Amino acid sequence: MHFPYGLSDFGTLREEDYWYLDRTDRIPALEQAGRQLIFLRPRRFGKSLLLSMLEHYYDLNRAEQFGELFGNLAIGREPTALHNQYFVLKWDFSLIPAHGEIADIEDAVHRHINDRITAFQYRYASQLPRPISITPEHAISSWESLLSTLSQTPHKLYLLIDEYDNVANEVLMAARPGSQDRYQTLLQGEGLLKTVFKSVKAAAGGLGLDRVFITGVSPVVMSDMTSGYNVGKDIYLEPAFNDLCGFTEAEVATVLNQLACEGSEDGEGSAWTAPAALETMRTFYNGYRFSEEAPESLYNPTLSLYFFDALYRRGQYPRRMLDENLAMDRNKLMYIAQLPQGEDLLIEALSGDDRILIPELVQRFGVADVLAAVKDQPFMASLLYFFGILTLNGLSEFDECRLRIPNLVARGLYVERLRERWLPVTGRSREVQEVVRALGQHGDLAPLCDLIEQSYFRVLSNRDYRWSNELLVKFAFLTLLFDDRLYMAVSELETDRGYADLALIVRPDKRRFQVLDLLLEFKYLSLKDLGLSGEQVRERPREALAERPAVKAKLDEAEAQARDYGGTLIERHGLKDLRAFAVVALGVERLLWRAL
């Protein structure tokens, strides 16, 4: 079980006996789907490995390696007639730097395409009737020379384009003046990227380019190119290709069972169990669904390999469930949070599953829509879907698309963003760490409540939040307590009788430490309903406030729910010492609580 963590070259995986999850059975369906395909998935979702597999399958130079590379895979048993029949050219736009002025970016695009054509010429030198003319300052001219040369051969070209939208997305979201102008220069009118794709479209019209496969993250760039490239077929929402990238739960469970049987690399045996590991991976990595009709959700493949690799090499879970090198789309989440209604949508998504309902995904929108159009919920939710920060969750009874946060890794990115936006902790990080330890290690809630009253409420009370209620209180605790190093922190965790507001369940591999399982139920009482002013609430002792009938009723209600939900959690997770709390906020002034 040699895992290809961080590797995306299909040949290396097969030649060096890395573990590979076979997706070659989809090749016939891809051939039938069309000659110019567009496949969108979030970053770090296995798109590059998919392209590499197609490159090795169709490359005429690798015909003698077909048995070695594909012999024991699905397509090796039933190959299509097109295997090893193409010249293959690959462009990887993620390698093109997007900084500097527009001239710098355009130069980088020309260099990348020219470099790939030069490498193509070396690789296929024995099959080419004449040299390809490389024009250093004009890659389109080099491209046309390549096509002209290939027209003198019996084979056609298969073009693979990885991360087609990377350059434009980086330009658009760069936090610097003039980003929108630079983006428009690249993609609109006679912009270079638009011209590149126009030349691809023309080449597929009888000039020797037979097939194109394009991967990317969002449809923004393709929409802005309009007539530049309007011949590609979108396959990213088709149920047949839902798991073209990504792992199913059955596949993940099979790997875990095999690792548990074999033990860790040092031969000492496993200190973990496959069922517990599967539950942890399900919480952190599962949940992605890319078709409304898809039968099941998927695990993020890169993060799953990160987890498998830690089990294989060290016999234990990774210390952090999100590898910082794989913090996909954190910058995009920050960008969206700053757009009109962007933060409201993040809050709505964190409030619980099935809160975001839209008639359908918006699939065609350009930069003008992102920057200037009315940011209604369908638009913003669709943008988050393509970035992998929301995912499909089936259809409502009214035939609407349900969207939800896919898993705890994505939820952590939301929490991190809101924490940075609401409560800068410069100079207070040590204090936050101490109050969180007091609760998580000793079950002492008082220091955390004091910190929230003194700092968090002071910040939030100065902002015009129409949702200043129980939700605000829950988010104050969630943003401070979220820590995937120790916990599976779940907001709105479903139990048999309802939804627990905030449950912090210790990770199975962390139970050897002195860390408590926690459950918090929140209620909110406005100052108007309490009949007191903010100043009065701040001045009175907590004990006196807790005796007021309205406050006591809220505490009783939260306590009853906490006991009810706590029983379900104890049974479900086999918890030994669950600490549960009923918490009531009096406006955004004071917090009262009971430890159960």
Image: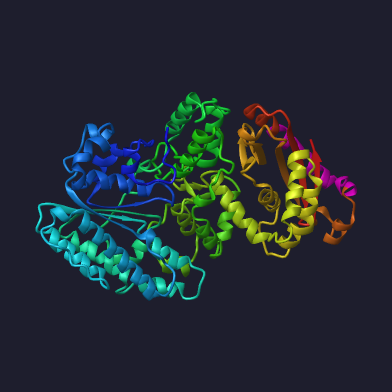
Q: Position of residue 343 (x, y in %)?
A: 58, 59
Q: Is residue 290 visible?
A: yes
Q: Is residue 276 left or right of residue 362?
A: right
Q: Position of residue 458 (x, y in %)?
A: 76, 61
Instruction: Name the image quarter holding residue 457.
Output: bottom right
- Looking at the image, which is closer to me, 418 or 549? 418
Q: Is residue 577 left or right of residue 124?
A: right
Q: Is residue 526 visible?
A: no
The residue stretch that appears in magenta: 543-565
Q: Quadrant of the C terminus?
A: top right
- Relative to 460, does residue 393 appear above or below in the rendering? above
- Main secondary-structure element of the magenta-colored stretch: helix
Q: Residue at x 53, y 43 (%)?
A: 407
Count every numbered label the image shows and give the total: 0
Any magenta on residue 560? yes
Q: Is residue 309 left or right of residue 146?
A: right
Q: Residue at x 49, y 33 (%)?
A: 312
- Relative to 531, does residue 269 appear above or below in the rendering? above
Q: How is the image coloured?
A: rainbow
Q: Position of residue 10 (x, y in %)?
A: 32, 43
